[in-house]
Amino acid sequence: MTEPQIVRADFALSAEAIRTVREEVFIEEQGVTPELEWDGLDAEAVHVLACTADGTPVGTARLLADGHIGRMAVRAAWRGRGVGRALLAELIAIARERGLARVFLGAQTHAVGFYERQGFVVYGEPFMDAGIPHRHMARELSPRAPMR
């Protein structure tokens, strides 16, 4: 398997690929209801998509205008291979381009270590989202701060 390419994706043009990954990861694997997954915010978000050379989508994530990173999903066979880190790095680059000083997210508790390694810090109390335990996390951005 070759490493996937990370691209900025227009939701209207890439909706099928984005839906394929998110439905597999969130709805099928994690039991999130479609009503919660499809929250109506995709049209206003900036999306990134990881695809193999043959166009197979393997990961996706989005950034909202306020700096909220979310819907980060990587297909099981591609986890642990740097896809999530690459998606996150691209979203942080976009946030910097837009002049955001901070990005934030709700991390599933099992993924807190991953985000900490990327410079995010836990804050606040644990919370449940879609029946899954989460933690609030944020990362301050400076124009020159590299990903770890």
Image (spheres, rainbow, N blue to C red):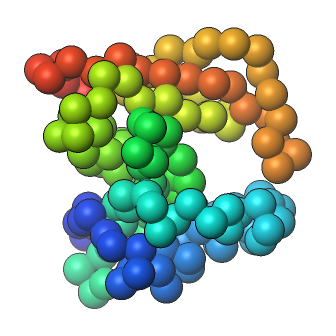
Q: Residue at x 78, y 21 (%)?
A: 126
* In the rendered image, the vertical position of residue 88 relative to residue 140, given as above or below: below
Residue 42 visible in the picture? yes
Q: The C terminus appears in which quarter of the rendering? A: top left
Q: Is residue 114 left or right of residue 110?
A: left
**Considering the image in quadrants, where does the N terminus appear?**
bottom left
Q: Is residue 5 left or right of residue 44?
A: left
Residue 143 falls in image quadrant: top left
Pinpoint residue 24: horizontal percent, then vertical percent.
65, 72
Q: Position of residue 8 (x, y in %)?
A: 26, 63
| Res 129 → quadrant | top right
Instruction: Give the camera-side residue of 18 and 28.
Output: 18
Q: Nearer the viewer, residue 72 or 142?
A: 142
The answer to whether 138 appears left or right of 14 in the picture is right
Which residue is rendered at x = 67% and y = 62% of the image?
39
Q: How many marks?
A: 0
Question: In the shown orientation, is residue 115 left or right of residue 86?
Answer: right
x, y percent for residue 106? 62, 34
Between residues 18 and 99, which one lies in front from this camera angle? Answer: 99
Extreme-right residue of the structure: 131
Measured as percent of width and height from the top left, residue 130 is found at: 82, 49
Q: Name which quarter of the figure residue 118 lies in.
A: top left
Position of residue 75 relative to residue 96, above or below, is below
